[in-house]
Image (cartoon, rainbow, N blue to C red):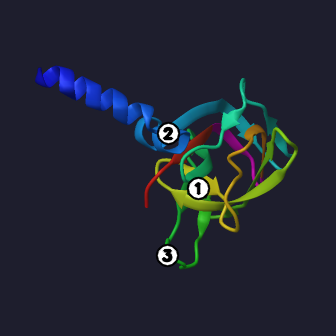
Amino acid sequence: MNKFLITLLLAFTLSACDNDLYNELFRNPYMVDVAEGVKLDQEWKKFSPKSPLEIINQRQWVTIGFEGAEKWDFIKDGMESIGLVDQDDNPIKIDVKIITLDGREFRLAESSISSFIAFGIYSTKLPKDTEVSTIYIRSSRAIADANIGWLCTTGK
């Protein structure tokens, strides 16, 4: 009897979820591998995922992971950032922009670093009424073996 009530309650709760709540509960984080082992340089590189990238949850980032010997330094909370640097401590500037299915362009800024560097948006939220069709990335210095991803999360 208790299993039946729990199942009924769970089904009722899930059916009452809107898309945002469903995504935050069951698709958090939402991660998509866009490209692996690519070389970045001063020319814009275009990445078109196999299917458009959904804009869900509260925060969205383009992520770049590095297989090579690059290292980075980043100080959070309004402090100045050295950002990404090469083996000789020369700074590497990376530009990232995304294009949505309806043609809107958003430039992303370096926002966090963990096992990858993430680029997000601060001035406004990305619109949830469309999807990302294309990612463009360029780097002031050549970077080999970069892995490009899309990450959406909820939380602080």
Of the numbered discs 1 and 2, the one sitting upstream in the chain is 2
Q: Is residue 88 on the magenta stretch?
A: no
Which residue is identified by label 1? Answer: 87
- Give residue 99's quadrant in the image: top right
Which residue is identified by label 2? Answer: 23
Q: CA distance from mark 1 to mark 2?
A: 40 Å
Which numbered marker is on residue 77?
Answer: 3
Magenta stretch?
139-148
Between residues 155 and 115, which one lies in front from this camera angle? 155
| Residue 8 at x, y percent in the picture | 27, 25
| Residue 23 at x, y percent in the picture | 50, 39
Q: Is residue 140 on the magenta stretch?
A: yes
Q: Amino acid at mark 2?
A: Asn
Q: Amino acid at mark 3?
A: Asp
| Circle 3 residues within 10 Å: few <14, some 14–19, many ≥20 | few
| Residue 143 at x, y percent in the picture | 69, 45
Q: Main secondary structure of the magenta part?
A: strand
Q: CA distance from mark 3 to mark 1?
A: 25 Å
Q: Element under label 1?
A: loop
Q: Element under label 3?
A: loop
Q: Residue furthest left?
A: 1
Q: Residue at x 85, y 45 (%)?
A: 44
